[in-house]
């Protein structure tokens, strides 16, 4: 996707990158809340998806996919693992769906949520490398600096 992306215009064809749908990993992250940007119910989401996993799943369907180095505006962390926006073409130039099973943005995101857990990279992870919530260790209560 080396083409220069310009502003959105309704006269552009659906095959032009500007008309493709955008998907951020936060949209299907079960660890996020609705106010943090999750778009689907938790039952349809996956824990901490990456843009590479989303890309791999969508490329396997035969859809045209592009990856952009963008950060979701509601994302608190600026780290590289949270970067990445996926663009997907779901309509032909005449407005008809490219694939009947992917006629809406929601149908594409639900498919991604179902498919990422089936990836080999997800299934072969040892238990100690599974993503875990941050754990805080509070050793003792009391005043700091007291000896």
Image (cartoon, grey):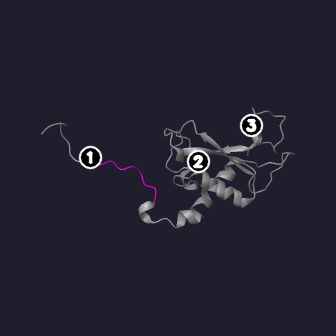
Determine whether, in the image, residue 118 is placed left or right of residue 97: left
Magenta: main secondary structure equals loop
User: 69 or 40, which is in the foreground?
Assistant: 69
Q: Position of residue 2 (x, y in %)?
A: 74, 43
Location of the C terminus by quadrant is top left
Q: Is residue 38 visible?
A: no
Query: Which of the two residues, 94 or 7, is positioned nearer the viewer here?
Result: 7
- Label of residue 138 in the image: 1
- Residue 5: assigned label: 3
> Disc 3, disc 1: CB below 8 Å?
no
Which residue is rendered at x = 53% and y = 47% of the image?
Answer: 81
Gap between marks 3 and 1 measured at Cα: 49 Å
Q: CA distance from mark 2 to mark 1?
A: 31 Å
Outermost residue toward the front? 2
Whether 132 is among the magenta residues is yes
- Classify mark 1: helix, strand or loop: loop
> Is 38 situated left or right of 13 in this image?
left
Q: Provide residue 27's location: percent of width, then percent of height.
A: 59, 46
At horizontal 58% and vertical 66% (from top left) the residue drawn is 120
Please report whichever mark, 3 or 1, sits nearer to the chain's N-terminal start.
3
For the point 84% across and 41% down, the residue is 13
Secondary element at tag 3? loop
Left or right: where 57 falls relative to 98: left
Per the rendered image, the range of residues in magenta is 130-137
The dot on residue 25 is 2
Foreground tag (3 vs 1):
3
């Amino acid at each position: 996707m080396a083409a220069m992306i310009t502003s959105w215009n309704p006269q552009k064809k659906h095959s032009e990158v500007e008309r493709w749908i955008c998907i951020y990993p936060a949209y299907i992250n079960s660890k996020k809340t609705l106010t943090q940007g999750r778009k689907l119910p938790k039952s349809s989401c996956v824990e901490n998806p990456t843009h590479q996993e989303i890309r791999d799943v969508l490329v396997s369907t035969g859809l045209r996919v592009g990856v952009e180095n963008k950060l979701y505006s509601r994302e608190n962390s600026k780290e590289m693992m949270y970067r990445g926006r996926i663009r997907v073409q779901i309509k032909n130039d005449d407005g008809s769906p490219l694939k009947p099973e992917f006629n809406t943005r929601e149908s594409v995101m639900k498919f991604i949520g179902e498919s990422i857990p089936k990836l080999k990279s997800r299934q072969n992870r040892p238990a100690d490398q599974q993503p875990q919530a941050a754990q805080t260790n509070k050793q003792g209560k009391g005043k700091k600096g007291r000896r």
